[in-house]
Image (cartoon, helix red, strand yellow):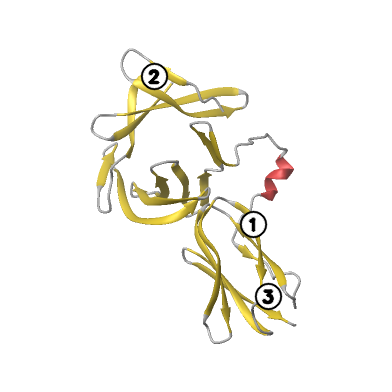
Amino acid sequence: MDTSVYFDTIAYCKLYRELNYSGLQYYKYARLRIDSFYVLFNEFDSTETHIYYKKNAVIGDTWTIGGNTVYAIEDTFVANVFGEQTTIKLLTRDNGLVYIQEYWTEKFGKLSSQDFGGIIDDLQGCVIDGIVYGDTTFTIVSVEDESETPSSFYLAQNFPNPFNPSTTLSWELPFGNWQTLKIYDVLGNEIATLVDGFKPVGKYEVKFDASGLASGVYFYQLKVENYIETKKMQLVK
Protein backbone atom coordinates (compact mmCIF):
# COMPACT_ATOMS: atom_id res chain seq x y z
CA MET A 1 0.00 0.00 0.00
CA ASP A 2 1.29 3.45 -0.91
CA THR A 3 1.88 5.54 2.22
CA SER A 4 3.24 8.68 0.56
CA VAL A 5 1.98 12.11 1.63
CA TYR A 6 0.50 14.26 -1.14
CA PHE A 7 0.19 18.03 -1.42
CA ASP A 8 -1.74 20.25 -3.80
CA THR A 9 -2.29 23.99 -4.14
CA ILE A 10 -5.68 23.87 -2.43
CA ALA A 11 -5.37 21.64 0.63
CA TYR A 12 -3.04 19.32 2.52
CA CYS A 13 -4.10 15.80 1.56
CA LYS A 14 -3.12 12.23 2.36
CA LEU A 15 -3.67 9.05 0.43
CA TYR A 16 -6.69 7.41 2.06
CA ARG A 17 -7.05 4.18 0.12
CA GLU A 18 -5.57 2.43 -2.89
CA LEU A 19 -7.94 0.07 -4.69
CA ASN A 20 -7.17 -2.42 -7.43
CA TYR A 21 -9.86 -3.56 -9.84
CA SER A 22 -8.69 -5.99 -12.55
CA GLY A 23 -5.26 -4.40 -12.64
CA LEU A 24 -6.55 -0.81 -12.65
CA GLN A 25 -5.31 1.21 -9.68
CA TYR A 26 -7.77 3.66 -8.20
CA TYR A 27 -6.87 6.17 -5.50
CA LYS A 28 -8.90 8.08 -2.95
CA TYR A 29 -7.57 11.02 -0.95
CA ALA A 30 -8.71 12.59 2.30
CA ARG A 31 -8.23 15.84 4.15
CA LEU A 32 -9.40 17.26 7.47
CA ARG A 33 -11.42 20.46 7.13
CA ILE A 34 -11.33 23.27 9.68
CA ASP A 35 -14.85 22.28 10.86
CA SER A 36 -13.52 18.85 11.99
CA PHE A 37 -15.09 16.93 9.10
CA TYR A 38 -12.99 14.53 7.04
CA VAL A 39 -13.78 14.75 3.33
CA LEU A 40 -12.86 12.37 0.51
CA PHE A 41 -12.26 12.83 -3.19
CA ASN A 42 -10.87 10.60 -5.91
CA GLU A 43 -8.01 11.13 -8.33
CA PHE A 44 -10.35 11.72 -11.28
CA ASP A 45 -12.17 14.67 -9.72
CA SER A 46 -10.35 16.49 -6.92
CA THR A 47 -13.04 19.20 -6.78
CA GLU A 48 -15.88 16.83 -5.82
CA THR A 49 -15.61 16.16 -2.08
CA HIS A 50 -17.74 13.97 0.15
CA ILE A 51 -18.05 14.33 3.92
CA TYR A 52 -17.03 11.03 5.47
CA TYR A 53 -16.45 11.34 9.21
CA LYS A 54 -16.54 13.93 11.99
CA LYS A 55 -13.31 13.85 13.99
CA ASN A 56 -14.68 15.18 17.30
CA ALA A 57 -18.12 13.51 17.16
CA VAL A 58 -19.75 12.42 20.43
CA ILE A 59 -22.77 10.25 21.27
CA GLY A 60 -25.92 11.83 19.87
CA ASP A 61 -24.20 13.77 17.07
CA THR A 62 -25.76 13.36 13.62
CA TRP A 63 -25.03 14.77 10.17
CA THR A 64 -26.51 14.23 6.72
CA ILE A 65 -24.77 13.43 3.45
CA GLY A 66 -26.36 13.74 0.02
CA GLY A 67 -29.65 14.87 1.49
CA ASN A 68 -30.82 11.44 2.64
CA THR A 69 -27.99 9.52 4.33
CA VAL A 70 -27.94 10.17 8.07
CA TYR A 71 -24.78 9.51 10.07
CA ALA A 72 -25.01 9.16 13.85
CA ILE A 73 -22.74 8.28 16.76
CA GLU A 74 -24.65 5.58 18.65
CA ASP A 75 -22.14 4.45 21.27
CA THR A 76 -18.56 4.65 22.53
CA PHE A 77 -16.56 2.08 24.49
CA VAL A 78 -12.96 1.24 25.33
CA ALA A 79 -11.42 -1.96 23.97
CA ASN A 80 -8.05 -3.46 23.12
CA VAL A 81 -7.06 -2.77 19.50
CA PHE A 82 -3.71 -4.07 18.23
CA GLY A 83 -2.49 -4.27 21.84
CA GLU A 84 -3.59 -0.77 22.88
CA GLN A 85 -6.55 0.36 25.00
CA THR A 86 -8.51 2.51 22.57
CA THR A 87 -11.80 4.40 22.57
CA ILE A 88 -14.06 3.06 19.82
CA LYS A 89 -17.01 4.97 18.38
CA LEU A 90 -19.96 3.12 16.85
CA LEU A 91 -21.12 5.09 13.80
CA THR A 92 -24.31 4.21 11.92
CA ARG A 93 -25.29 5.12 8.35
CA ASP A 94 -28.93 4.99 7.30
CA ASN A 95 -30.46 6.16 4.01
CA GLY A 96 -33.79 4.39 4.44
CA LEU A 97 -32.71 1.43 2.32
CA VAL A 98 -29.32 0.42 3.67
CA TYR A 99 -28.23 0.43 7.32
CA ILE A 100 -24.50 0.16 8.01
CA GLN A 101 -22.50 0.09 11.24
CA GLU A 102 -18.91 1.34 11.38
CA TYR A 103 -16.38 1.22 14.20
CA TRP A 104 -13.95 4.16 14.40
CA THR A 105 -10.98 5.12 16.58
CA GLU A 106 -8.97 8.31 16.87
CA LYS A 107 -5.63 6.58 16.25
CA PHE A 108 -6.43 3.82 13.75
CA GLY A 109 -9.36 5.36 11.88
CA LYS A 110 -12.07 2.97 10.70
CA LEU A 111 -11.72 -0.54 12.11
CA SER A 112 -14.60 -2.23 10.32
CA SER A 113 -17.98 -1.77 8.70
CA GLN A 114 -20.86 -4.20 8.31
CA ASP A 115 -24.46 -4.42 7.13
CA PHE A 116 -27.12 -7.07 7.60
CA GLY A 117 -25.36 -9.20 5.01
CA GLY A 118 -22.14 -9.33 7.02
CA ILE A 119 -18.75 -7.67 6.85
CA ILE A 120 -18.05 -5.00 4.23
CA ASP A 121 -14.46 -4.19 5.12
CA ASP A 122 -12.15 -4.82 8.05
CA LEU A 123 -8.84 -3.31 9.16
CA GLN A 124 -6.19 -6.03 9.36
CA GLY A 125 -3.21 -3.80 10.13
CA CYS A 126 -1.54 -0.45 9.59
CA VAL A 127 1.74 1.44 9.92
CA ILE A 128 1.69 4.71 11.88
CA ASP A 129 4.87 6.76 12.34
CA GLY A 130 6.92 3.73 11.38
CA ILE A 131 5.24 1.45 13.94
CA VAL A 132 3.50 -1.68 12.64
CA TYR A 133 0.13 -2.60 14.13
CA GLY A 134 -1.60 -5.89 13.33
CA ASP A 135 -0.97 -7.65 10.03
CA THR A 136 0.37 -5.49 7.20
CA THR A 137 1.25 -8.38 4.90
CA PHE A 138 -1.23 -7.98 2.05
CA THR A 139 -0.81 -10.83 -0.42
CA ILE A 140 -3.02 -11.73 -3.38
CA VAL A 141 -4.27 -15.28 -2.90
CA SER A 142 -6.17 -17.69 -5.10
CA VAL A 143 -9.95 -17.74 -5.17
CA GLU A 144 -9.90 -21.07 -3.32
CA ASP A 145 -8.08 -19.47 -0.38
CA GLU A 146 -10.91 -16.98 0.08
CA SER A 147 -12.85 -19.78 1.78
CA GLU A 148 -10.45 -19.38 4.71
CA THR A 149 -12.30 -16.20 5.69
CA PRO A 150 -15.01 -17.18 8.19
CA SER A 151 -18.57 -16.69 6.93
CA SER A 152 -20.21 -17.03 10.34
CA PHE A 153 -19.49 -17.16 14.06
CA TYR A 154 -18.10 -20.46 15.29
CA LEU A 155 -16.94 -21.54 18.74
CA ALA A 156 -15.15 -24.89 18.60
CA GLN A 157 -15.03 -27.55 21.29
CA ASN A 158 -11.92 -27.16 23.39
CA PHE A 159 -9.05 -29.56 22.73
CA PRO A 160 -8.08 -31.72 24.45
CA ASN A 161 -11.23 -32.46 26.42
CA PRO A 162 -11.13 -33.74 29.15
CA PHE A 163 -7.88 -31.89 29.89
CA ASN A 164 -5.15 -31.50 32.52
CA PRO A 165 -3.96 -28.88 33.19
CA SER A 166 -4.39 -26.81 29.98
CA THR A 167 -6.57 -26.81 26.89
CA THR A 168 -6.96 -24.73 23.72
CA LEU A 169 -10.09 -22.75 22.85
CA SER A 170 -10.63 -21.64 19.25
CA TRP A 171 -13.25 -19.54 17.47
CA GLU A 172 -14.01 -17.77 14.19
CA LEU A 173 -15.25 -14.24 13.48
CA PRO A 174 -17.01 -13.22 10.24
CA PHE A 175 -16.33 -9.53 10.97
CA GLY A 176 -14.25 -7.44 13.36
CA ASN A 177 -15.83 -6.48 16.65
CA TRP A 178 -15.36 -6.16 20.38
CA GLN A 179 -15.67 -9.53 22.11
CA THR A 180 -15.21 -11.42 25.37
CA LEU A 181 -14.25 -15.01 26.05
CA LYS A 182 -14.80 -16.00 29.69
CA ILE A 183 -14.60 -19.10 31.87
CA TYR A 184 -17.32 -20.01 34.41
CA ASP A 185 -17.81 -22.75 37.00
CA VAL A 186 -20.97 -24.86 37.36
CA LEU A 187 -22.48 -22.25 39.70
CA GLY A 188 -22.10 -19.50 37.11
CA ASN A 189 -19.21 -17.78 38.87
CA GLU A 190 -16.73 -16.09 36.54
CA ILE A 191 -13.35 -17.82 36.84
CA ALA A 192 -11.26 -16.05 34.19
CA THR A 193 -11.42 -13.62 31.28
CA LEU A 194 -9.29 -14.84 28.38
CA VAL A 195 -10.28 -12.21 25.80
CA ASP A 196 -11.74 -8.73 26.27
CA GLY A 197 -11.14 -6.46 23.30
CA PHE A 198 -11.50 -5.77 19.59
CA LYS A 199 -10.32 -8.35 17.06
CA PRO A 200 -10.58 -8.22 13.26
CA VAL A 201 -12.18 -10.90 11.10
CA GLY A 202 -10.36 -14.22 11.32
CA LYS A 203 -9.71 -17.43 13.23
CA TYR A 204 -8.30 -17.34 16.76
CA GLU A 205 -7.19 -19.62 19.54
CA VAL A 206 -6.09 -19.13 23.12
CA LYS A 207 -4.72 -21.51 25.74
CA PHE A 208 -6.50 -21.85 29.08
CA ASP A 209 -4.32 -22.97 32.01
CA ALA A 210 -6.36 -24.49 34.85
CA SER A 211 -3.43 -25.46 37.07
CA GLY A 212 -4.94 -23.60 40.02
CA LEU A 213 -8.42 -25.07 39.68
CA ALA A 214 -10.02 -28.20 41.08
CA SER A 215 -11.24 -31.05 38.90
CA GLY A 216 -14.75 -30.64 37.56
CA VAL A 217 -16.95 -29.22 34.83
CA TYR A 218 -16.37 -25.67 33.57
CA PHE A 219 -17.95 -23.57 30.84
CA TYR A 220 -16.44 -21.12 28.35
CA GLN A 221 -18.56 -18.42 26.71
CA LEU A 222 -17.90 -16.27 23.63
CA LYS A 223 -19.90 -13.04 23.39
CA VAL A 224 -19.84 -10.74 20.33
CA GLU A 225 -22.69 -8.19 20.19
CA ASN A 226 -25.88 -10.32 20.04
CA TYR A 227 -23.99 -13.56 19.44
CA ILE A 228 -23.48 -15.64 22.59
CA GLU A 229 -22.34 -19.26 22.65
CA THR A 230 -21.37 -21.41 25.63
CA LYS A 231 -19.66 -24.82 25.66
CA LYS A 232 -18.79 -27.28 28.41
CA MET A 233 -15.35 -28.68 29.20
CA GLN A 234 -14.02 -31.02 31.88
CA LEU A 235 -10.87 -30.72 33.96
CA VAL A 236 -9.57 -34.07 35.25
CA LYS A 237 -6.60 -34.15 37.60
Q: Is residue 44 visible?
A: no
Question: Which quarter of the picture shows residue 170?
Answer: bottom right
Q: Residue at x 54, y 29 (%)?
A: 19
Q: Tell me if label 1 and label 3 are in contact, CB under 8 Å.
A: no
Residue in the image at 72% along x and 44% along y: 145
Instruction: Give the percent coordinates (x, y) of residue 226.
Output: 47, 66
Relative to the observer, which residue lies in front, 211 or 97?
211
Q: Residues within 10 Å of mark 3 (few under 14, many from 20)?
A: few
Whole-percent x, y for residue 155 in the image: 63, 66
Q: Secondary structure at mark 3?
A: loop
Per the rendering, the mark at residue 211 is 3
CB under 8 Å between discs 3 and 2: no
Task: Kindly identify the residue that appears in the image at 54 percent across and 24 percent down.
Answer: 2
Quarter of the view holding residue 31: top left
In 3D space, how far apart are the residues under numbered discs 3 and 2 (Cα atoms)? 62 Å
Q: Is residue 16 above or below residue 57?
A: above
Is the residue marked by circle 2 packed among few (<14), some (14-19), or many (20+) residues within 10 Å? few
* Residue holding disc 2: 45
Give the amino acid at mark 2: Asp
Quarter that holds the C terminus = bottom right
Q: Are marks 1 and 2 in contact (CB under 8 Å)?
A: no
Instruction: Determine whether the residue tagged by mark 2 lies in a helix, strand or loop.
Output: strand
**Label 1 or label 2, whichever comes before in sequence order:** 2
Is 80 on the left-hand or right-hand side of 93? right
The amino acid type of the residue labelled 1 equals Tyr
Q: Which residue is mark 1?
A: 204
Nearest to the eye among marks 1 and 2: give it.
Answer: 1
Residue type highlighted by circle 3: Ser
Badge 1 element: strand
| Real-space Cα separation, disc 1 to disc 3, in angstroms | 22 Å
How many numbered discs sit on the rendered protein?
A: 3
